[in-house]
Image: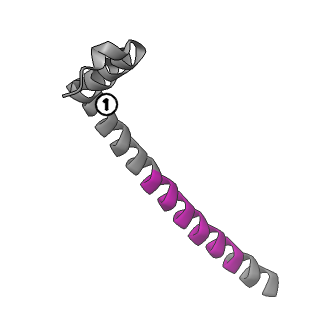
Amino acid sequence: MLPWHQFGCMGAAMRFVRAILWNRRGATAVEYGLVLALITLIVSVSIREVAGTTVDMWNMIDTKVAKH
């Protein structure tokens, strides 16, 4: 292992990175963030699909009403 403490600021940066990598709370927060992002993506796509179907339904009703 390299003696990072000899590099001053680089040593502090390496300690910071090492602390982040070994911090389990940070990993859990990242995992929750990824799950939240996935749920948001799924909800967004679902709403878009439902909206498309609803618009098609109302367009069909409009066409049938306009014929009569």
Indicate the quadrant where residue 32 lies: top left
Q: Residue furthest bottom?
A: 67
Q: In which quarter of the image is the C terminus?
A: bottom right
Query: What is the chief secondary structure element of the magenta stretch?
Result: helix
Kindly identify which residue carries mark 1: 29
Q: Residue 16, percent across and down? A: 33, 19
Q: In which quarter of the image is the N terminus?
A: top left
Question: In the rendered view, would you say 13 is above or below 38?
Answer: above
Q: Residue at x 26, y 32 (%)?
A: 27
Left-right relation of 38 to 45: left
Does residue 20 show up magenta in the picture?
A: no
Q: Residue 14, percent across and down? A: 32, 23
Indicate the quadrant where residue 29 lies: top left
Three-letter code, disc 1: Ala
Magenta part of the chain: 41-60
Q: How is the image coloured?
A: one colour
Name the one closer to the observer, 52 or 59. 52
Question: In the rendered view, would you say 11 is above or below 55?
Answer: above
Residue 25 in view here: yes
Question: In the rendered view, would you say 41 is above or below 33?
Answer: below
Name the one closer to the observer, 26 or 60. 26
Q: Residue 12, percent across and down? A: 35, 14
